[in-house]
Image (cartoon, helix red, strand yellow):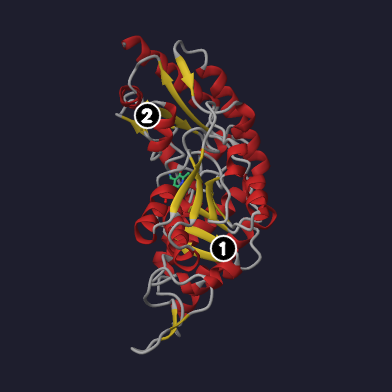
């Protein structure tokens, strides 16, 4: 894969920052940039197709509906789900997780029942369950991590008991880059008769996902982290679960018949899609997935593995460098680091002055920060359009900042 050529698909990457520095965008775990193909497809839909979807008899409505449902099929294919009835459009990973916590919790969890999470979860996979805890008195059980940021799998097995109702865990850590052994986690949970939700926010952009091979019960991801638009995401759920949990929100689209006495709900997946969906964003998401598929995960993984290895090697040349997370083999394209005692906020702010975009802070993972005994880190995260030159610019930038202190 030629990352330089790919860069041409992303107009924003040509930007010059502070009228001086070419943009070096290394904040891809927060959100990715969008290729022309995505933006143009969405513009085209607004200019030429726009109409509300489903049940419209007129031409535009039918065309918009066809596009929206074709996008659902693209998502199904991307995840290798069995059926489009298992693909629910949401606003993103956060909404997908909240949906499961709320609806699965309502159907299957009562006071004292337990959900298993891990110490490296994003706040969205902690607070959603705490809201359920406040409503229904459930308990959160937490898999500890090792000092190098891997799950303690022995402890995981010991957390199961007759009150365990669900495991909800991230595929890839947005801080440490750890790739969790989700296949083993799912197998072990299923041996205990417990379903599993996988937070795929950080895995979908970097590796092929096959929900049938994984055998996960739910899988959540966000469009904006995989070169698609903001405001759209996906919840995959096995039909048997989606069928057996109540709707999340009430409104149009999600009903079959409404009366003041009794309302019946629509079939899957519409039962979970109250209100007008973002049918233009679904087109953008499908285009983004097509874009990724056209490059192919073999090429993306080879490129990103090379970049991550190169970045680790180059960063370690910097005096006082500490990198968090596991060794390279288990490490995805996210690197959290700290240089000497330079505050991460100072480092990030000064790198920005050189046109280098990294993220600083707790990365929505405060419990993980507490476990690591730190307040925050600087985080560089890579995408398919990053190059070794971007890494060189980062390392030079860090050196320049270090010299100031
Ligand atoms: N989980 C993980 C692991 C994440 O990295 C993120 C985004 N930082 C989320 C969940 C939430 O995603 P979103 O904000 O797109 O809903």
Q: Nearer the viewer, residue 151 or 339?
A: 151
Relative to residue 229, is residue 306 depicted above or below? above
Measured from the top left, where is residue 188 in percent x and y? 66, 49
Measured from the top left, where is residue 296 in percent x and y? 65, 46
Q: Residue at x 50, y 24 (%)?
A: 391
Q: Residue at x 61, y 27 (%)?
A: 328
Q: Nearer the viewer, residue 58 or 122?
A: 122
Q: Residue at x 50, y 52 (%)?
A: 115
Which quarter shows the N terminus? top right
Q: Residue at x 39, y 14 (%)?
A: 340
Q: Nearer the viewer, residue 66 or 237?
A: 237
How far is the residue under mark 1 from the one under mark 2? 34 Å
- Residue most extreme to the right: 213
Labels 1 & 2 near each other (Cβ < 8 A): no
Residue 44 can be seen, yes or no: no
Residue 237: assigned label: 1
Residue 123 can be seen, yes or no: yes
């Amino acid at each position: 894969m030629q990352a330089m050529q790919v860069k041409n698909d992303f107009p924003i990457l040509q930007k010059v920052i502070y009228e001086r520095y070419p943009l070096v965008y290394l904040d891809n775990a927060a959100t990715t940039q969008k290729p022309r193909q995505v933006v143009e497809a969405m513009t085209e839909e607004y200019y030429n197709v726009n109409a509300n979807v489903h049940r419209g008899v007129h031409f535009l409505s039918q065309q918009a509906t066809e596009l929206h449902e074709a996008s659902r099929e693209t998502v199904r294919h991307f995840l290798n789900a069995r059926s489009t009835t298992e693909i629910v459009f949401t606003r993103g990973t956060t909404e997908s997780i909240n949906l499961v916590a709320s609806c699965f919790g309502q159907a299957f969890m009562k006071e004292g029942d337990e959900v298993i999470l891990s110490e490296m979860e994003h706040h969205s996979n902690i607070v959603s369950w705490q809201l359920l805890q406040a409503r229904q008195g459930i308990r959160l059980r937490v898999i500890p991590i090792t000092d190098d940021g891997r799950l303690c799998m022995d402890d995981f097995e010991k957390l199961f008991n007759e009150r365990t109702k669900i495991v909800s865990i991230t595929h890839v850590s947005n801080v440490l880059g750890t790739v969790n052994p989700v296949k083993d986690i799912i197998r072990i949970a299923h041996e205990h008769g417990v379903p599993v939700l996988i937070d795929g926010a950080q895995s979908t952009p970097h590796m092929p996902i096959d929900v049938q091979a994984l055998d996960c019960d739910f899988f959540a991801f966000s469009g904006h982290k995989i070169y698609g638009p903001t405001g759209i995401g996906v919840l995959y759920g096995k039909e048997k679960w989606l069928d057996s949990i109540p709707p999340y929100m009430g409104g149009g689209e999600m009903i079959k018949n409404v009366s003041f006495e009794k309302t019946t709900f629509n079939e899957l997946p519409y039962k979970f899609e109250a209100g007008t969906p973002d049918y233009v964003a679904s087109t953008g998401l499908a285009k983004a997935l097509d874009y990724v598929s056209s490059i192919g995960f073999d090429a993306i993984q080879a490129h990103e593995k090379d970049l991550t290895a190169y970045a680790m090697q180059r960063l370690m040349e910097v005096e006082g460098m500490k990198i968090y997370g596991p060794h390279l083999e288990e490490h995805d394209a996210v690197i959290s680091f700290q240089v000497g005692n330079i505050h991460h906020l100072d480092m990030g702010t000064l790198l920005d002055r050189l046109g280098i975009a990294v993220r600083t802070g707790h990365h929505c993972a405060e419990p993980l920060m507490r476990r690591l005994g730190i307040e925050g880190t600087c985080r560089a995260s890579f995408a398919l359009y990053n190059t070794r030159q971007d890494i060189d610019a980062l390392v030079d930038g860090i050196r320049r900042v270090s010299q100031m202190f």
